Image (cartoon, rainbow, N blue to C red):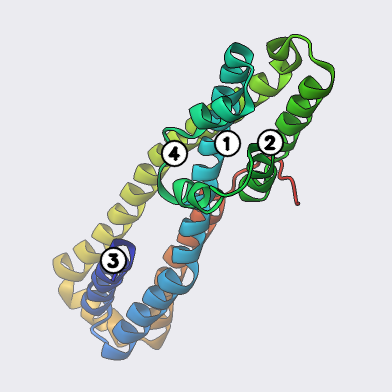
Amino acid sequence: MNKSIIYFVIFSLLIGVVAFVASNNIFITIGVFAVYLLYFILIINKKLKEYVLKCERIHHCYHFINSFLIALSVKDSLDESYISATSAANGEFKSILDELRDMDTIEKMDYLRKYFNLAIYKMFLDVVNLYLDQGGSLLNMADSVMAESTRIEETLNKSSASSKRIFFEFVILWVLSLAVLLFMRFMISDFYTRMLNSFIFLILLVLFFVLILFSIHIFIIRFTSIYVKEDKV
């Protein structure tokens, strides 16, 4: 069981405990726990994996483009430039590169277009091909590509930092909301117990947990949205 699944189970259990304390109803508790857990495992887990994978590909693409162009401008060798650009590869990117070891450098670079799936990488390939055909000053030809690649990388980093800050604010907001609910449960227990006898109150309580889940969904959708032009090979 990977760490994310463990975190999902723990969080769903905590929500389930809060639901039980707040409702004193085992059916509501099981329902809330099951819905949260299934949602996290089937939807959130997939969204986060796709987000992490796309971020990694953007970072790898940025480092590959800039390292390759700088090395090619100095060494004027595709093979040496490719080695320089991939020397620090790790994770999935390294695994992909290992699968390409029997290809020549041009074939490797063309294949990586499918892996990166970014419009900026296609622009990079066009510049390299133009340089190989016509020569000239590579860095001048590639200036716009390197600038755009850097802009994408910086935008992604800023977006990630901003999302982390908003995430903590989001968590604090709902923790305080749950704390208020628990405060009512224990500090005005007599009145709260009478409210639990109301079917309408139980419905509202269920809707409260649905609202939390819906807000989590909206947050995750926005958090994992990366607006970078893709290649669509």
Which residue position is annotated with label 2? 121
Task: Give the residue at x 68% y 12%.
Answer: 139
Task: Give the alpha-carbon distance from disc 1 to disc 3, as whole Å.
Answer: 35 Å
Task: Give the residue at x 70% y 23%.
Answer: 145
Which residue position is annotated with label 1? 61
Q: Characterize the local packing of mark 2: few (<14), some (14-19) or many (20 or more) Cα atoms within 10 angstroms.
A: many
Question: Which of pointers 1 and 4 lies earlier in the amino acid sequence?
Answer: 1
Task: Give the alpha-carbon distance from disc 1 to disc 4, as whole Å.
Answer: 11 Å
Give the residue type that dot 4 points to.
Ala
Disc ID at residue 11: 3
In front here: 144 or 227? 144
Q: Position of residue 128 (x, y in %)?
A: 73, 26
User: Is residue 117 placed above or below 119 in the rendered structure?
Assistant: below
Observer able to see residue 113: yes
Tag 2–tag 1 contact (CB < 8 Å): yes
Q: Position of residue 220 (x, y in %)?
A: 49, 55
Q: Position of residue 15 (x, y in %)?
A: 29, 70
Circle 2 — which element?
A: helix
161 sits to left or right of 62? left
Give the residue type that dot 2 points to.
Tyr
Nearer to us of marks 4 and 3 is: 4
121 sits to left or right of 134? left
Task: Give the alpha-carbon distance from disc 4 to disc 3, as whole Å.
Answer: 34 Å
Question: Which of pointers 4 and 2 lies earlier in the amino acid sequence?
Answer: 4
